[in-house]
Each structure stands twice: as C-alpha cells, then as structure tokens.
C-alpha cells in the first residue's frame, strides 16, 4: 500500500512538474505531425503495394463463387427442364403404350371373334355336309336295300311259284309287298 | 554518461507522456518511436510478404488468416458505406488503421517493453500509448470524414451540416452547432479512448508484475491474454468508428428548407445517428 502511494505521489509529481496541459500529456505538434505523416505514408505504401493483391484475390474468389452459383443455377434449371422433358416423354410413352395395348386388345378381340365366326361357319358347314352325306348314304342304303330285297323276294317268289317273273312283274310285286310291309 | 540497460526499478515506472530518449537537433526521439519503428518495419515487411504470397497463390495458414481478416474488414466497410466504389476508396485508410493499432497494441504487451531501459527510461513504449499518435490517427480519421463529405455534398453542401440560418431554421442552426461540437468530441473521444486503453493496459501489466514480484510469470499471462482481447476490440472500434463517421458525413442530410422532414438515409445500415459513445 505504501508502495502504491509512493508510486502515485511520484506520478503526480512528474505530471505536476509540466508547465502546460498539452505538455503534461506529452502532446508535441512536431511529433504529432511526424506521426501523422508516417501513418499516411504507411497507408499510401500499403495501398500501393499490398492491398491490390489482397483485393484482387478477394474479387477473384467472389467472382469464382458467383460464377459457381450461376453455373449451379443454370445446372439446376437444366435439370428441372430435363426432368420436365423426361416426365413429358414418359407421359407420351405411357399414352402410346396404352394406345398400343388398347389397339392390340381390340385387334385380338376382332381376331378371336373372326376366328370364332369362321370356326362356327366351318362347323356348321361340316355338320350340314355330314347331314347331307348321311342322307345320301341313307338314301343309297335304302335303295340298295330295296334292290337287294326285291331281288331276294323275286328269287324267293320264283322258288315258291316256280315261275319266272319278268322284271316288270317282279317290281310291281315287290312294291306291293313293301307297301304292305309298311 | 553510459546508458544503463535493464535497470532494476524499485518502484514501477509510469509516465503519462512518451519519454524522450535523446534528440536529433531539436527533434525529440521518444521511447514510443523506437517501438513504432519496429511496428512500421513489421507491418511493411509482413504486408509485402503477404502480397507476394498471395500472388504466388500460397495456401499458408497465416496468409489465409490475414486474407480472412482483410476480407472481413473490407466487407464491413462496404456494408457500412453502402456504396462499393466509395467503400473501396476508404478501405485502405480504415483497414490500415486496424492493422496499425492492433500491431502496436500487441507489441506494447511484449515482455521487453518496460524492463529494457536507457538512462533509467524504458527504451520501448507502445506507440498507441502516445497521445501524439492517437491524436494524429483521430485527426486523420476526422479529416477523412470531412474530405469524403465534401466530395459527396460539395464544400458548401457540407457546411450546411454545421452552419444554418438561425432566422429561418432556429432548431436546425442549434443542431448545426451541436454537430460541430460533436465533431470535436468525436475526435477527442477517438484519441483518448485508444490512448486510455493502451496506457491503462500497460500500467496494469506493470502493476501486476510489480505486485506479484516472483509470481509474475504466473500472474501476467492472464492479464496479457486479456490485453490481447482488449487490443483487438479497440482496434476494431477505432476502425469501425472511422468508417461510421465517414459514412455519416456522406449520408444525405436535411437542409434549412426541409428540416421538418425526416432525413432520407442513403445507407440502410446507418439509418439512425452515430454519436460516438
């Protein structure tokens, strides 16, 4: 504490010994001018030789960042446009695919219907042909049967009556017999 | 007389003004100038090395750190000024103020400042702990503000900030007088704030070293770190206030005719007043 007081008294003594206010503060216009000039020279020197490089580096970096940002924006726009195109193409492709499927379905149905119709017609024709053939066969069989029957009857009759019957007589007899048989 | 170096002091040596070591003719060489010369050499050599390193495209951490600080300061000037072109004109002065003050502040904290003496007077003293320097810087700052204001408004346009017709606009005339007083108070505040902080910091370190005696190697680093922080703050404050004062001077201001109308602020960041605290 005593030391602090001693220090304070010494300091006070030093300042009190100075005659004027500015002198007490150590303000000397010559020194002030020198310091001001020295600082301005320093500013000039740094402005001339140091700061341009630093400012250029900052400007270059900012320009690169801006360029990068612009490029990113352009890329983003392009990506959006590409996505839109892809979506559009996808929609078109889907529409085309749907159309193709629908057409194919329609054509398939038409083909099936056509095939069915053709098959039905053919079946009908086969059936009708078969019926006709059957009728013909039946008719032929009947005719053959009749003929054979007639011959058999004629033969039998000849044997029974010991008489040769001519063809005309034979036929009429058979006819009458058959008529009775019915 | 043989000068004594590293003199052992019984009491801490504290002097408000920078002390004269010797003189060249009538010109005194003070102990703040010795450290000041070192700071000028340091700033110039570091600046040139930085410029060359940047040109070479060096990715040295110190170079990148200094570029980062420079960019931050430049951005601050541009944001406060609003006008990029004008900001680029002011930036060299403002940024040099920052680097100059912080360099001298930090040099003043170094352990050899104080103990190394010449004829019983400390051979080194922080340059910013010399009122001649802080006043010179403050004067340069305020003159710059006036120069930029005159560039924007013209000589008479700038004069209307201070001198107005009291019969037409009594309130404006009174405001002009206050503005004129404010300019001088800003100058004084700028210089005394910086000087006070640097000087108080040096005195604090001296007193802590003196009071703790053999324990000072343990006690001092804490206060030194604190001073590093204060140094950065004070450098930034001086830099910022210079930019703000210049910006205030270049803002559009009201005249006699439209005093009742609100001032149209050109710079959005400084829409309201900027009295130095």
Image: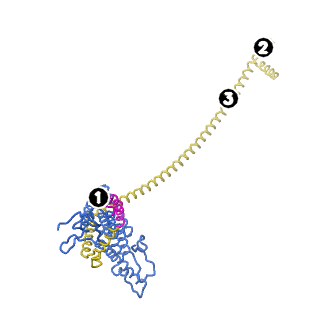
User: Disc 1: which chain?
Assistant: B
Please give the range of residues in magenta. Answer: B211-234
Residue in front for this viewpoint, A61 or B110: B110
Mark 2 or 3, closer to the camera: 3
Q: How is the image coloured?
A: by chain
Q: Is residue B181 visible?
A: yes
Q: Tell me the blue chain.
A: B
Residue A156 marker = 2
Secondary element at image label 2: helix
Report, in whole angstroms, how far the alpha carbon at label 2 lies from the one at label 3. Answer: 37 Å
Helix, strand or loop at label 3? It is: helix
Is residue B47 rendered to the left or right of residue A142?
left
> Mark 3 falls within which chain?
A
From this view, report whether residue B257 is shown above or below residue B35: below
Chain A's shade in the image?
yellow
* Main SS class of the magenta portion in the image: helix
Q: Which mark is residue A130?
A: 3
Q: Which residue is mark 1?
A: B54
Q: Nearer the viewer, residue A153 or B267?
A: B267
Indicate the quadrant containing the N terminus of chain B: top left, top right, bottom left or bottom right: bottom left
Q: Taking A179 as reference, is B120 left or right?
A: left
Instruction: Locate residue A90, reporting x and y percent.
Output: 50, 49
- Judged from the image, the secondary structure of the residue bearing numbered disc 1 is helix
């Amino acid at each position: 504490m005593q030391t602090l007081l001693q220090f304070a008294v010494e300091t006070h003594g030093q300042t009190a010994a100075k005659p004027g206010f500015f002198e007490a503060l150590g303000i000397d216009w010559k020194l002030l001018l020198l310091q001001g000039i020295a600082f301005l020279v320093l500013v000039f020197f740094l402005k001339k030789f140091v700061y341009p490089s630093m400012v250029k580096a900052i400007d270059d970096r900012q320009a690169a960042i801006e360029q990068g940002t612009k490029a990113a924006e352009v890329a983003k726009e392009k990506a959006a446009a590409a996505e839109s195109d892809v979506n559009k193409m996808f929609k078109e492709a889907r529409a085309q695919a749907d159309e193709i499927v629908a057409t194919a379905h329609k054509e398939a149905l038409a083909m099936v219907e056509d095939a069915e119709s053709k098959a039905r017609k053919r079946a009908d024709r086969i059936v009708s042909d078969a019926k006709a053939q059957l009728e013909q066969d039946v008719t032929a069989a009947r005719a053959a049967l009749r003929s054979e029957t007639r011959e058999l009857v004629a033969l039998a009759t000849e044997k029974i009556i010991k008489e040769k019957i001519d063809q005309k007589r034979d036929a009429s007899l058979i006819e009458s017999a058959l008529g009775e048989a019915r | 007389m043989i000068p004594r170096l590293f003199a052992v002091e019984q009491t801490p040596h504290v002097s408000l003004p920078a002390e004269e070591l010797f003189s060249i003719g009538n010109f005194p060489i003070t102990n703040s100038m010795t450290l000041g010369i070192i700071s000028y050499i340091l700033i110039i050599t570091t600046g040139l090395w930085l410029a060359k390193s940047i040109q070479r495209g060096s990715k040295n951490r110190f170079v990148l750190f200094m570029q980062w600080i420079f960019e931050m300061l430049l951005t601050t000037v541009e944001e406060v000024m609003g006008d990029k072109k004008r900001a680029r004109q002011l930036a060299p002065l403002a940024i040099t103020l920052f680097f100059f003050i912080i360099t001298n502040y930090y040099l003043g904290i170094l352990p050899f400042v104080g103990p190394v003496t010449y004829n019983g007077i400390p051979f080194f003293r922080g340059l910013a702990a010399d009122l001649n320097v802080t006043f010179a810087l403050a004067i340069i700052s305020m003159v710059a503000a006036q120069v930029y204001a005159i560039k924007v408004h013209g000589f008479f346009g700038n004069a209307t900030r201070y001198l107005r017709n009291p019969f037409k606009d009594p309130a404006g005339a009174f405001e002009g007088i206050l503005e004129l007083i404010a300019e001088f108070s800003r100058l004084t505040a700028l210089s005394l704030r910086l000087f006070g902080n640097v000087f108080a910091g040096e005195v604090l370190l001296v007193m802590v070293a003196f009071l703790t005696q053999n324990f000072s190697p343990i006690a001092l680093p804490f206060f030194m770190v604190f001073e590093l922080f204060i140094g950065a703050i004070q450098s930034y404050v001086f830099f910022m206030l210079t930019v703000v004062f210049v910006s205030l001077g270049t803002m559009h201001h009201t005249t006699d005719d439209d005093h009742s109308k609100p001032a149209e602020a050109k710079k959005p960041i400084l829409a309201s007043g900027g009295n130095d605290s």
